[in-house]
Image (tube, rainbow, N blue to C red):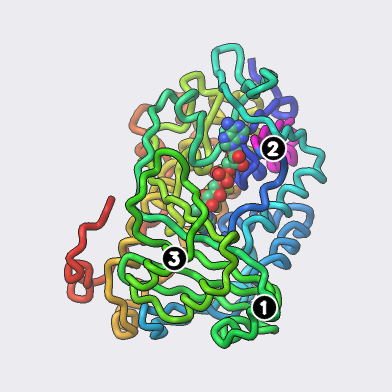
Amino acid sequence: MAKHAEKLRVVIVGAGFCGLTAAIECQLRGMHPILVEAYAGASSHGDLLDFVPNAGRVFDSWANGRVGEALLAAGVNRAKTLDFYNQDNVMLRSDPWPQGIDLKGTFAGHRGAMHEIVYNYAKELGIEMHFNSRVEKYFDSDDEHGVIIAGTGKKILGDVVLACDGPKSLARSQLLGLPESRVNSGYAIFRAFFELTEEMLQDPFMAELTKKDEDTTRFWVGEDMHGFIYTWNQGRDCAWVLTHLDDADIQESWSFPAKKEDVRTYLKQAKFPEVWSRVLDLTPEDRMVDYKLVWRDPLTTWLSPAKHSAVMGDAAHCHLPTSANGACQAVEDAATIAICLEKSQGDVPLALQIFERIRFNRSHVIHQASISTRNIYHKNNWTPEMVEKNPGSLVMPLLEWVVDFDCQKNAEDNYDRLAKEVISGKTGTIEELSLPAGGNYDCMNLTEEDNKAAALQKTVPL
Ligand SMILES: Cc1cc2nc3c(=O)[nH]c(=O)nc-3n(C[C@H](O)[C@H](O)[C@H](O)COP(=O)(O)OP(=O)(O)OC[C@H]3O[C@@H](n4cnc5c(N)ncnc54)[C@H](O)[C@@H]3O)c2cc1C
């Protein structure tokens, strides 16, 4: 018997951007979300994260734009350009920074600060949240759907369970019956966020990177390495990330304290310019981590057999940072499922199947691009001439079909047709049943003659 959406109890595991957005969107649509998170509160960890309008417009729709304004104020909002350099510090291109041309819905900056803003909005809406609550068991039978909390054994039941439990998702094995399938991507990323002191600002390299009235966003690319340095908040905040080759094991932990000497070795190997060594020297060592980049092959379904539970966000599609859209895709998942649950009038299996068919191909193609983009960056000897000749090649992979996309309108527009197809029992593979991805990344591939990948004579992992 269908239950009206207003009475739906939606158990959501994980208060990352996916879980928080799902909880907010379900609450705004009159459901009863129950958010369960292992951490003690909003997590302030993380460094750089950029949201672009395919996710940013969801944030902008909240509280008459107030949440979007807060996100904008907290981040990189006064940069004029994103500048690309090669390992010789030669500028390859300089693109307008989105906010410099007044594009709405672009929020970049410190992940922790942005996470807190979204968390505070969830709190303001009065969403039921259980922190310090690690789910140890998911269950989804014909008549019971929910989770059990470790330690207390507390059972939380719902009409639907949304597992937004991130890259190490327990739901993948317990709800979908999938074996653990992590693969070391062959790369790791050094990450750092720190506040700049007056003393640091005296350094000529740091002084050049920071401006009182302008934020700076720069990107360097070289053989097997690329990295960003951002400074913002009137020259008070700095974050950098550096993706590097890595052969360490990933069995135990994915995140380690980073050692400066290791970073130095990689910078030297890739012949990165002096500005990187200077920024490294100035970075407090306890603000640096070395984060293993784990790859997971795409899942063939995101739904439990009883179709009352779904995995979403990084639990369903764990992006490498080079897609530049992992968190945005998590937000698209969350916004889409809330619409499907609302429109299904309590028919959860119908809602979840439509959700999967709306999201599958688009998410899959963007997920896959994280590998090809990384290889395009790392396996070419970039020169200004190459970039000039192939202007679409060395770019952030934020193509129009990815960024200029309204996931909520898309869900509204396609729901009824997909509902008919689900109800009629239309058969096919998930790719055939799902909406088309809407685009590809072909324009980033260099022409044969300009493609220096072969010249580098490298085996590209994955
Ligand atoms: C270095 C780096 C840079 C990136 N840059 C970008 C970018 O610029 N743009 C972009 O769009 N994406 C970016 N991404 C990707 C983005 O960070 C992720 O795709 C996104 O944060 C995933 O959100 P999520 O909510 O699905 O998962 P998570 O943020 O991992 O949240 C999962 C939550 O679930 C909780 N949890 C897990 N297990 C349990 C359990 N058993 N019980 C209770 N709670 C549990 C965790 O504590 C966590 O809070 C980047 C990623 C990296 C690593």
Residue 153 location (% of width, % of height) = 67, 18
The boundaries of the magenta stretch are 23-38
User: Which residue is identified by label 1?
Assistant: 235
User: Which residue is identified by label 2?
Assistant: 26
Residue 70 shown left or right of residue 319 in the figure: right
The amino acid type of the residue labelled 2 equals: Cys
User: Which residue is identified by label 3?
Assistant: 261
x 32%, y 70%: residue: 269
x 58%, y 81%: residue: 206
Mark 2 or mark 1: which is in front?
1
Which is more N-terminal, label 1 or label 3?
1
Q: How many marks?
A: 3
Residue 23 location (% of width, % of height) = 69, 39
Which is more N-terminal, label 1 or label 2?
2
Label 2 and label 3: CA atoms lie apart by: 47 Å
Q: Are marks 3 and 1 in contact (CB under 8 Å)?
A: no
Residue 388 appears anywhere in the view: yes
Residue 438 location (% of width, % of height) = 42, 53
Q: Which of 4 and 451 is in front in this view?
A: 451
Q: Which of 455 and 391 is in front in this view?
A: 455
Label 2 and label 1: CA atoms lie apart by: 38 Å
Q: Nearer the viewer, residue 63 or 89?
A: 89
